[in-house]
Image (spheres, rainbow, N blue to C red):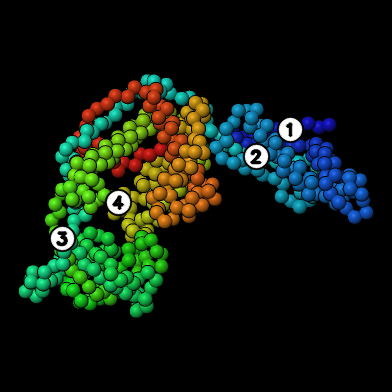
Amino acid sequence: MDAMQVTETLVEGLKHEFQISVPASDLDAKADVKLVELKDKVKLNGFRPGKVPVSHLKKVYGRSVMAETIDQTIRDTNTQIFTERGFRLATEPKISMPTEAKEVEDILSGKSDLTYTVSIEVVPAIALADFKSFTVEKPVVEVTDADVDEAIKRIADQNRPYAAKPEDAKPEGAKAETGDRVTISFKGSIDGVPFEGGTGEGIQVVIGAGQFIPGFEEQLIGIAANETRTLKVSFPKNYASEKLAGQAAEFETTATAIESPQDSVVDDEFAKTLGLESLDKLKEAARERLVAEFAGATRQKVKRMLLDRLDEAHRFEAPPSLVEEEFNLMWNSIKAEMESGGKTFADEGTTEEAAKEEYQKIADRRVRLGLVLSEIGEKNKITVTDDEVSRAVIERARQMPGREKEVWDYYRSNANALAQLRAPIYEDKVVDFILELANVTEKKVTREDLYKDDDAEKSAA
């Protein structure tokens, strides 16, 4: 009996190609085993259960059983080849099979050997650095009384009371100014036709707060109670609703009340309006929130430093197809964002070629760091439990009050979305593992230093 033949036909960096030939006799023997298993499962007219001759089954099911056998043989053979050589695949193998009708027919009928080509791209062997040699300087910010006072002032500004603007404030009566709160009712139309979601009754607008689309609030300046105006605005090109994005619209708007902001008195009574017992309790809550905020910023900074260190310590060729895939995801997103905002590369002070080169480097970094983090996790048996993922789903659901069930169902029925939740949890666990081994020192810094360069996009996978 002829033996299966495996010939490596290409080795080019991380790319390998093999030509495999499986004798027809091997396929035939495997197909016969499947047909024997089928004997007890099928019912054919004229035959008692389990008594159908294999030769007859071959006539009826031969082609489909052989197709199934070929599929299984390719999977098993590929697994054997990759395992023997210790390959970890970067992407799914690409299989090239005979396509001519006669060749396919001869293989399915057992007359010809199965010859196919498999192309793969592998993950390189990664030599991990000694994490005990890593030094990490952890920036720490202490929350001061001034920080707490500033936070409470912001809370007071956000919750400041409004009172009806006195009619005698100006000779011509009460007119809305920047900072005033105007209660309005409006009907929107595009080219004279009302559109869905374009009407509102008793809506409160603080002029200058930027809650409405650009140009809307500014046109309310000078409006009086019971006055009606037609506001002309354009929806931004990147507006959430595609039907409205970039469209010019008119809003027939009536002001029903004009109110001006009043000074907030920050005392125990003010704290009670926020559901807290006293001003001291409000200060405690503000301090706790700031501590958590600063800790989060510290964590992000330390993580970024650590990823930079991992990047420097692990230089290897990343699988080209993974880099290309990562680059395409980012590039398509950037292009869509720029188009919706009506921006060009020149507006950003760059060219398309320079931007592509920059994003190519970011894609390469992300793929390498992703592989390094994965290798660290695998070598040290770091896993994400179902409970941890469930907690992340619950947290996401909490952020959308009233739609909890919808969020829960979405994640439970969408494996990709669940994987996207799992990835950052895994990354954080690997980062914590490294920080346990690394030499971490604390350095007191100012609040400004902590948030400096916060927009630098140097994230991992």
Q: Is residue 220 left or right of residue 249?
A: left
Q: Which mark is residue 348?
A: 4
Disc 1: which residue: 5
Q: Is residue 315 left or right of residue 260?
A: right
Contact (Cβ within 8 Å) of mark 3 with mark 1:
no
Q: CA distance from mark 1 to mark 4?
A: 56 Å
Q: Residues within 10 Å of mark 2 (few under 14, many from 20)?
A: some
Which quarter of the rendering shows the C terminus? top left
Q: Residue furthest front?
A: 277
The one nearer the camera, 426 or 128, is: 426
Q: Residue at x 38, y 73 (%)?
A: 195
Q: Which mark is residue 118?
A: 2
Disc 3: which residue: 261
Q: CA distance from mark 3 to mark 2?
A: 72 Å
Give the SS element for disc 3.
strand
Q: Residue at x 34, y 50 (%)?
A: 351
The one nearer the camera, 22 or 216, is: 216
Give the SS element for disc 2.
strand
Q: Position of residue 387 (x, y in %)?
A: 49, 38
Counting residues from the start of the chain, the first of labels 3 and 2 encountered is 2
Q: Residues within 10 Å of mark 1 (few under 14, many from 20)?
A: few
